[in-house]
Image: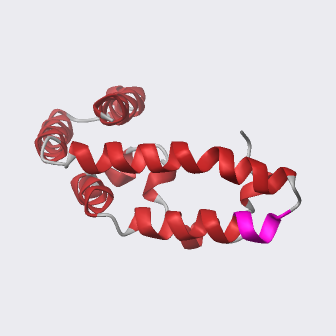
């Protein structure tokens, strides 16, 4: 999961680098301060919680695939939404959202930043693998 957070920071930095030339020195200082604050905040996120969530999703994925293959779409959707809501309410995920709040406009759209309601129109069986 540390790699996941590092990737988030790298992606946000890369996305920001594209607009580098258009930024004033003051804007650059503000952005760097925000990135440092986000990085310090991310260091406080409970890695054990994130690892647990990752393992639970990894364990659930084959079950979801099996349900979808068996035509049990409603059961698969209900199961996925249940863990998705639990994930959204997880303190570690909420901490990541808080940590990245001041950088939200500068970061690319990240799936973990969405709420389960954002996916209400999508079906787990139709999602790309």
Quadrant of the rendered structure where residue 107 is? top left
* 71, 87: nearer the viewer: 71
* 102, 81: nearer the viewer: 81
When the figure is inspected, residue 118 is found, relative to residue 14, above or below; the finding is below
When the figure is inspected, residue 19 is found, relative to residue 51, above or below; the finding is above
Q: Which residues are magenta?
A: 72-76
Q: Residue at left 57%, top 73%?
A: 117
Secondary structure that dominates the magenta span: helix
User: Which residue ends up furthest to the right in the rendered image?
Assistant: 71
* 86, 121: nearer the viewer: 86
Quadrant of the rendered structure where residue 48 is? top left
Quadrant containing the N terminus is: top left
Classify residue 106 as left or right of residue 112: left
User: Residue 75 at what x, y percent from top left?
Assistant: 73, 69
User: Residue 68 at what x, y percent from top left?
Assistant: 81, 55
Q: Residue at left 51%, top 64%?
A: 83
Classify residue 60 as left or right of residue 19: right
User: Residue 92 at what x, y percent from top left?
Assistant: 26, 56
Q: Residue at left 32%, top 57%?
A: 93
Quadrant containing the C terminus is: top right
User: Residue 62 at what x, y percent from top left?
Assistant: 66, 44
Classify residue 6 as left or right of residue 82: left
């Amino acid at each position: 999961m540390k790699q996941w957070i590092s990737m988030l920071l790298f992606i946000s930095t890369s996305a920001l680098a594209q607009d580098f030339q258009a930024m004033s020195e003051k804007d650059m200082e503000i952005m760097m301060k925000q990135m440092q604050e986000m990085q310090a905040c991310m260091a406080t996120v409970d890695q054990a919680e994130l690892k647990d969530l990752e393992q639970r999703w990894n364990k659930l994925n084959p079950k979801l695939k099996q349900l979808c293959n068996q035509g049990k779409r409603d059961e698969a959707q209900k199961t996925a939404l249940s863990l998705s809501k639990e994930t959204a309410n997880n303190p570690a995920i909420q901490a990541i959202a808080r940590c990245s709040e001041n950088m939200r406009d500068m970061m690319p759209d990240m799936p973990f930043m969405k709420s389960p309601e954002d996916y209400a129109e999508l079906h787990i069986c139709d999602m790309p693998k």
